[in-house]
Every structure is written in C-alpha cells, then in structure tokens.
Amino acid sequence: MSKFTMEDLVNYAKKWGFVYQGSEIYGGLANTWDYGPLGVELKKNLKTAWWKTFIQQSPYNVGLDSSILLNPDTWKASGHIDGFSDPLLDCKACNTRHRADKLIEEHAEEEIEVDGWSEEKLFEYINQNNVVCPNCGALNYTDIRKFNLMFKTTQGVVDDSKSDIYLRPETAQGIFLNFKNIERSMRLKLPFGIGQIGKSFRNEITPGNFIFRTREFEQMELEFFCQPNTELKWFDYWKKTSKEFLLKQGLSEENLRLKDHKPEQLSHYSNATTDIEYKFPWGFDELWGIASRTDYDLKQHQTLSGQTLTYHDQETNERYLPYVIEPSLGVERLFLSVLLESYKEETLADGETRINMKLPAHLAPYKVAVFPLIKKYHREKAEEIFTFISDFFPTTYDESGNIGKRYRRQDAIGTPFVITIDDDGRDNDIFTVRDRDTMEQVKLKKADLVPYLIKKTRYQ
Ligand code: GAP
C-alpha cells in the first residue's frame, strides 16, 4: 500500500505540472481538473498503451471514434433516460445532498453490498442504523428520489423540448450504433470487438476523491461481439487480458482484486459482471468494470430504430444478435492508480532523500532529459544532442542549478534516463546515460544512444 495520501498526491500533481484545479483563477469550478504539461503526456501514454493492447495488437478488435452527441433515441433504447439514476436524498438540517448508497457504504464498519437495493430498503437501513449526515450529524433526511445523471442540453437555436440532446454518459452506445457499419465495411466475422477512447459526462451527485469521480472524464471501452453461448468464455478471456494490462502499467498484484457481482447485484441485462478494484488510499474501489451484457443493447437499438442489426453466420446459415462482453476503464482512475503506485520516497547512500516517481518507462512524460554538465563548456553539444534525441523521444533539457538538483527534478517527474554532456561528450561524442531507478551510469557512443533508449523504453 502506498504511503502517499490523497492530499500529498494533489499537492504533488500541482507542483510538478500533472494536474491543476479547473478554473482556478476564478476560485475554481468544483471537481473539475486540468491536465498540465506532464499530466497530458501521462494520460496520452496510458491511452496509447490501451490502444496498442486492445486494438492494434489484438487479433480481434478494431477502433472507432464516434460522436459525443447522439440521436436522443439512443438513450431511450439504452435505458439511460429511464434508468440511469442514483438514489439522492437531502439532509433537511444542513441542506447538503448525498447518495443514499454511498452514505451506507461509508458508514458501515464492514464491507456492505447495497447494489440492487430498492429505495425503501436504503431508506430503512439509513434510519434504523443511525446513518447520520456526514456534514452536520443530523438524522433528518428527505425521501430518496431518483436523480438522472445525464447532462441535458439543447441543440440548435430553438430552445424547445424537441431539441433536447444529451452529452453521452458512456462511449459504449456510439459503438452499438456503428455495429453494422463496421461489420460490413471491415468485412468482419464473429468474434470481433470495437473499441474507443473518449470523453463521457455524468452529473454525479457526489463527485470527489480528486480525479476518481468527476462529471467529465474519459473512458476506454471495448464492446466485444460473440456468438451466444460463447460469452462466458470470452468474459474470462477479457478479465485476464485486462488484469495483465494493469500489471504492465506497473500496478502490483496486492493492490488489485477482482470482485464478481453476486446474482442479485447484476443489472437486468447482464449474466456476469466483475469489477477490477484498486486499493486507493480510502480502500479498494472500482477501477475497471467488465460486464457480459448479453444481446440487450443491440436488441434495444434494433427495436427502437427498426433497423435489422442481426449477424448472418455463414457457417451455420443462422441470423442472430451477437452477445457482448464490455470491459470499460476510466482513463483518470488508471492515471490515479499509476501515480499512487509509482510514487516512492527514497533515502540515498549519502543520506539525502529523493522522490522517485517510478513510472514504467513507456508511461513517463519524458523518456529522456539532456543536461550539459557545465553550461559554459557543454551547452553547445548538449543542444545538439537534445535536437538529435528529441526527434525520437519526448525529451526535456535542463541547464539550471547544480547537477544533483537537476537529477532530483527528473527523478521526481519520472524521467527514466538522463544524458549528461561532459568533456568526453563534447570532445569524443561519448555520453553518460543515467538510469533513474538504479542511478547507474553507462557510457555510450552517439550512434548507440537511440537503440539503447528504444530497447529500454519500448512498450511491449
Ligand atoms: N459502458 C459501461 C460503463 O460506462 P461504468 O461502470 O459506469 O460502465 C466504466 O463505467 C468505468 O468508467 C468505471 O469503471 C470507471 O473507471 C469510469 N468512470 C465511471 N464514472 C466515472 C466518473 N464519474 N469519474 C471518473 N471515472 C468514471
């Protein structure tokens, strides 16, 4: 478990240019976050790793980038207009708003499963177990009501209800809408998957825990289409692939757990669901949802659109709606877990301490930093090497302050390699490359720098 608290992480992320509070100069906008120069690189690297594993290297899957704004009938068919809501109640004493299920989970001393509970059951539990308002301590709530999480807006210039439109609360539905387009244009045969990465929006009642639950976030979703009756085999396959992916992003086995939903917790359309949970500073919580969704979504869209969405199986000459496995991961939750896991404070042999952001090299915002040992003597060569290396890798250059301080800065932001230019570099084109984690240094000729760094930083 990381010693890093959430407060430490928020401070670290701001100080080093990973994440800033949104709209800060206007006093902020609650629970919005902006990704700074290093944050945007880390986020991009996480998405690239996911895309490589789940799309480019998968023998089954292809990619998509569908619109955020979809025909509003999409959300009728998917069930989001009628059913995508959280149980909301207000404290009558202090007027704060709460999610009934979260109040219970946070109050209970032991882990409690409230998924699938009716509003009556939630309300009864809260009153019988004295689940008081976390803000003022009163036990004086309104009735629980359903609060739809979709952001509604209007399209076009006429502000009437006919042009109501929604910001998508998940990327998944854009995939279902394109199922037939992709099957036909790419001439795909089952099983195959369609993945996409993009923004989603939910008007969460209780956003919080830094970037863990926000109203605007990014998802990396795969909808994997297969023959009915093969779905549970594929469900296991994607659970395993997803867990392996997390281990490759540096998350450790002991901070991960797979939590299967019990039959009474399953959504009505699902015949199996697992959450991959990460051990955040407040305890295990959902990182990645993996659901076997049967043929529910395609069936709903087929009914409401009137378009045939069945697949023609040429081997059996049957037509059917494929079943679907959906692994759905939030970019920001992965970002958070990776930072928590990678942050290390170390005491060095000389008694000095350093922050070592031990990111896997493929995730590091900069792969390489270039330093002249002494500005006056080595700058020209260092600039030449910076230009050469930055053609191949995200690279930073630093010539200010003593060399020890410059190393510390790169360690703190996770740069895995530093090339230092000294007299040997300037005069003989032999360069010192320092490894962030071992702090060992190797001497390399200019021609060997790029192959060495590719080998060390490549994601495979
Ligand atoms: N299409 C299925 C779906 O959206 P979900 O469990 O609601 O399922 C999937 O969301 C993942 O998206 C979650 O496991 C989480 O990583 C991320 N996510 C969901 N809501 C989020 C929020 N408000 N803020 C940040 N990430 C969120």
Image: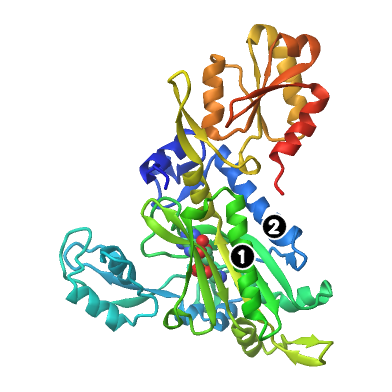
Ligand 1 has an atom within 8 Å of the beta carbon of the residue at disc 2: no
For the residue labelled by badge 2, is the local secondary structure a helix, a strand or a loop? helix
Q: Residue at x 66, y 43 (%)?
A: 362
Q: Circle 1 is placed at which residue position? A: 240
Instruction: Identify which amino acid the numbered label 1 is placed on.
Output: Lys
From the viewer's perspective, tell me whether residue 63 is left or right of residue 171.
right
Q: Position of residue 395 (x, y in %)?
A: 67, 31
Q: Circle 2 is placed at which residue position? A: 53
Q: Position of residue 233 (x, y in %)?
A: 65, 77
Q: How many marks?
A: 2
Alpha carbon of mark 1 to alpha carbon of mark 2: how far? Answer: 13 Å
Picture layout, residue 287 above or below residue 2: below
Callout 1: 10 Å neighbours few (<14), some, many (20+)? few
Q: Residue at x 47, y 65 (%)?
A: 202
Instruction: Identify which amino acid the numbered label 2 is placed on.
Output: Thr
Q: Quadrant of residue 85?
A: bottom left
Q: Residue at x 75, y 79 (%)?
A: 180
